[in-house]
Image (cartoon, helix red, strand yellow):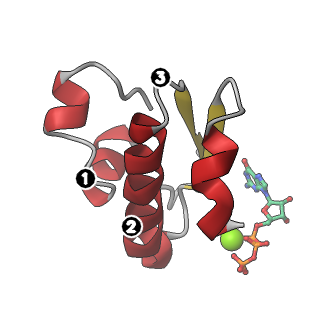
């Protein structure tokens, strides 16, 4: 599936990316995957990407600012107003 995402993005109207906010150990993998997707979404034209931070009810869940840091969402993407968590 991952290698086919590039073709998939050419045919969808939007992408919903769900994160387990409480799974801190996997944030590096999530970050890498998300940035790969962001690159492919961008090269496929304009595809809205919604990031859903799941499990926010758990006390150990990472909050907005922490997720933004872990996923390296600041910088260019955020400046362009293209990212909302
Ligand atoms: N507290 C809480 N639990 C949720 C939420 N959404 C899904 N779950 C539960 O999370 C569980 C699934 O997540 P995980 O336990 O991480 O399982 P997984 O991601 O399939 O497998 P792992 O590889 O072990 O992470 C299920 O028991 C769901 O009911 C949420 O918003 N809050
Ligand atoms: Mg999980």
- Inspect this view and state whether residue 54 appears: no
Q: Which element type, helix, strand or loop, lies under badge 2?
A: helix
- Horizontal side of 79 relative to 35 (left or right) equals left
Disc 1 packing (10 Å; few <14; some 14–19; many ≥20): some
The residue sitting at 46% across, 27% down in the picture is 45
Which mark is nearer the camera, 2 or 3? 3
Q: Residues within 10 Å of mark 3 (few under 14, many from 20)?
A: few
Residue 74 position by quadrant: top left
Measure the alpha-carbon separation of dots 1 and 3. Answer: 21 Å
What separation in Å lies between label 2 and label 1 (alpha carbons)? 9 Å
Q: Is residue 75 left or right of residue 40?
A: left
**Residue 77 versus residue 61: which sits nearer the camera?**
77
Q: Secondary structure at mark 1?
A: loop
**Residue at 16 percent of width and 24 percent of height:** 79
Q: Which residue is mark 3?
A: 46
**Residues packed near mark 2 inside 10 Å, few (<14), some (14 to 19) or many (20 plus):** few
Residue 39 image offset from top left, x and y in percent: 37, 48
User: Is residue 8 shown above or below 82?
Assistant: below
Residue placed under numbered mark 1 in the picture: 72
Q: Quadrant of the C terminus?
A: top left
Q: Position of residue 38 (x, y in %)?
A: 41, 45
First along the sequence among labels 2 and 3: 2
Q: CA distance from mark 2 to mark 3?
A: 20 Å
Badge 3 marks a residue whose secondary structure is: loop
**Residue hosting label 2:** 32
The mark closer to the camera, 2 or 1, is: 2
């Amino acid at each position: 599936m991952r290698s086919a995402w590039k073709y998939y993005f050419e045919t969808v109207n939007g992408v919903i990316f769900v994160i387990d906010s409480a799974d801190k150990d996997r944030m590096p993998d999530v970050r890498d995957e998300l940035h790969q997707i962001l690159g492919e979404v961008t090269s496929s034209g304009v595809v809205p990407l919604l990031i859903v931070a799941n499990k926010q009810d758990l006390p150990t869940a990472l909050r907005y600012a922490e997720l933004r840091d872990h996923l390296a969402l600041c910088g260019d993407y955020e400046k362009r107003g293209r990212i909302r968590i």
